[in-house]
Amino acid sequence: MPSPDAVIDGRPQARHVRRLPERPGSPAPWPAWVSPALIDSLAGRGIAEPWSHQVEAAERAHAGDPVIVATGTASGKTLALWLPVLSDLLDDDRGTALYLSPTKALAHDQLRALESLELPGIRAATYDGDTPPDERTWVRSHANYVFSNPDLVHRSMLPRHTAWSRFLRGLRYIVLDEAHHYRGMFGSHVAVVVRRLLRVAHIYGASPVVLCASATMADPQRAAERLIGAPVHAITTDGAPHGALTAVLWEPPEAVGIADKGDRAPRRSTIAETADLLSDLVCSGVRTLAFVRSRRGAETVAMLARDSVDEVDGDLATRVAAYRGGYLAEERRALEADLRDGRLMGLATTNALELGIDINGLDAVLVSGWPGTRASLWQQWGRAGRRQGEALGVLVAREDPLDRYVLEHPGVIFDQPVETVVLDPANPHVLGPHLLAAAREQPLTEDDATAWFGPTAVPLLESLTADGLLRRRRTGWFWTSKESPADRIDLRGEAGTPIRLVEDDTGRLLGTVEAARAPATVHAGAVYVHQGETYVVTALDLVEAVAFVRREDVDFSTTASEVADYRIISTDEEVAWGNGRLARGEVEVTSQVVGYLRRRYATGEIIGEEPLDMPERMLRTRGVWWTLSDEQITSLGDIDVAGAAHAAEHASIGLLPLVATCDRWDIGGVSTPLHPDTGRCTVMVYDGHPGGAGFADRGFDAAHTWLTATRETIASCRCDSGCPSCVQSPKCGNGNEPLDKASAVRMLDVLLRGSPGAGAG
């Protein structure tokens, strides 16, 4: 097999190449308290001694200190946590431990790894939505190490904690794996679930130690403390060896056969370019994983790559597949098994496989478009070379402002620390519903509420009582309904019944889509891709939660267009930027999917546009906005104010992930030359989650950096009047009209001149 580098060497699309050298490891002796049976079993797997960071973490955890291990991909974080957990379980037959991960796949993978140790006395099992009822009974009664996810703890374990009394009474450790994924709204929910779990364990007389494992993140100690609500010791010095990595920033070539936009020809579709790279690597014998931002994109990359490989080798084409959420459980398990045993040579996946599932022998990782954060990019690239010397990581840039900025400023990736995790467990939209669930689990007293849920808990409880949701008695707050309040909370913000995708002719269930995503992804006329086969949606019934599809070969994808309006509910903070202003607060956004575009797979060329009549959606959330005075607007001369503000809005949405741990699709934006709530030209970016997820607030805190990068990205783009790399948006409901690129730069110049950070540059 050739070196993975050989496939990309010398190709002009490689805009920046950084070769990261191999690094030796730093071993350390086994702690004296580690079970000899565990040491012998690890030796049988070729682990003769631990690395220094593993020992440091294990010693802290064994002493009863909460720990976060925030080291690189494939650094052995699992072993660092195995040492104290398994040693204690082997030493105490009544002790138990709970492992939680963001996905079912990772929990199953960790269980397989543990079972391979063949340790007598460890009774381990998974407990999730796929676990049959009879197995659930056995787990509750007998297992001492349970592998699950926060959703299961929230919906099953805590509401039915009496059925888990044996397990909770002996609970010694709670392991939170891939803790960097607990961010935004999801992370805020999980943080309160952890507090509820610790409280219920305390009721049963247990005081479990919380252990976190995470990819490298900025300030992991503070992030973990916000996650678990207690002091944490951070382990950040990585003692494991790491193989060499060639990291490449890849710009797709100019598209052929599409009219130029000014003096800058549009680029080839990132999806098509990723598929070509995947097929080239597979045909060269390089085992490759391609991370794609959307489910549909992952399916399309797999489909295009498989077709290309089939032209070279029909048998090899069968070893290319897609993996994403929404598959049935048996499909996911089969793909995971094929990936582990090496049957698959190429796999296109969503970030479902970003997590630490053990995959042997991967040589290369392609990342199709900026994945949202530097932490995610390094985590995804780190999946290559986990067991061998050389590896290849490629970021294939999209036509997007942030991707363009990264291509022009590679130091953003290679010379800056990863982002801080943003989460807010005190968000009343999060904490309030969980307090109802906690009151049902065990009535809450004032001291109890403050100790476990913080100083804002008691005022929230009083508000919930005034709304008739709780009853206040002398001994505390009580939940009085027969209904479980946990059923009202969706940890992942996927409110509503999942939409089933059903084949028209056969009635076969193909998969599911979250209710919130359905209007934009499975509307009538939408293209749905499943394991390389394309389907067209014939009807969407939101009431019955079903979309009907028919099998049809098409060479295009569909993208929904959305319009939005907003009003400012309250302003929490406002600062003067010269005559301009920067503010943040609570906003209400009304949005509606109004149509969709059809685009060629290979080129991204728009080949059609269709209207849609979908219901309006109301979102109360957090926003950050900036305004310009009439005098500032007048100073700009004769410009299209609406087009300038609209262009600046699009670009600022694209650049917010540079400073906040979010994805472009986690946020939205609106702009207007004169908004009634401010009386000024106003540009707003808001969180796309009820109550907010911390992204807009992070934009406010880092506004000078964020908006300076926005201005620079627009100004440096070589197009004349605006393109997808600077001010055009793929989800604009107004067809990217009006846009005034040049005036957007001037508008941002006027704003930034008054920024408190202007003198620091």
Image: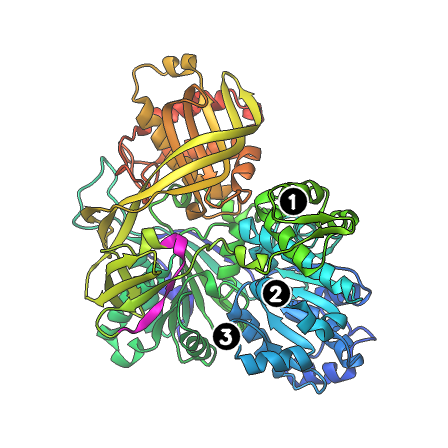
Circles 1 and 3 in contact, beta carbons < 8 Å: no
Foreground mark, 1 or 3?
1
10 Å neighbourhood of mark 1: few (<14), some, or many (≥20)? Answer: some
Assess whether residue 374 is covered by the magenta stretch. Answer: no
Inter-mark Cα distance, 3 to 2: 14 Å
Residue 605 in the image: above or below residue 639: below
- The N terminus sits in image quarter: bottom left
The earlier-in-sequence mark between 1 and 2 is 2
Q: Residues within 10 Å of mark 2 (few under 14, many from 20)?
A: many
List the residue tagged with mark 1: 465
Q: Secondary structure at mark 3?
A: loop
Q: Which residue is mark 2?
A: 153
The x, y position of residue 692, in whole percent, is 52, 42
> Can residue 349 be seen at all in this image of the molecule?
yes
Q: Secondary structure at mark 2?
A: helix
Instruction: Identify the mark nearer the N-term, 1 or 3.
Output: 3
Quadrant into which the C terminus falls: top right
Image height check: is 205 above or below 468? Answer: below
Q: Nearer the viewer, residue 667 or 34?
A: 667
Q: CA distance from mark 1 to mark 2?
A: 26 Å
Mark seen at residue 130 = 3
The kind of residue tagged 2 is: Val
- Residue 236 visible in the picture: no
In the picture, measured across the screen, residue 504 lies left or right of residue 633, that is: left
Q: How is the image coloured?
A: rainbow
Give the quadrant of residue 310: bottom left
Rendered residue at 57%/51% (across/down): 183
- Which region is colored magenta? 507-517
* Residue 716 placement (x, y as % from top left): 37, 34
Q: Hey, what amino acid is under mark 3?
A: Asp
Relative placement, left or right, of 756 versus 718 is: right
Q: Amino acid at mark 1?
A: Thr
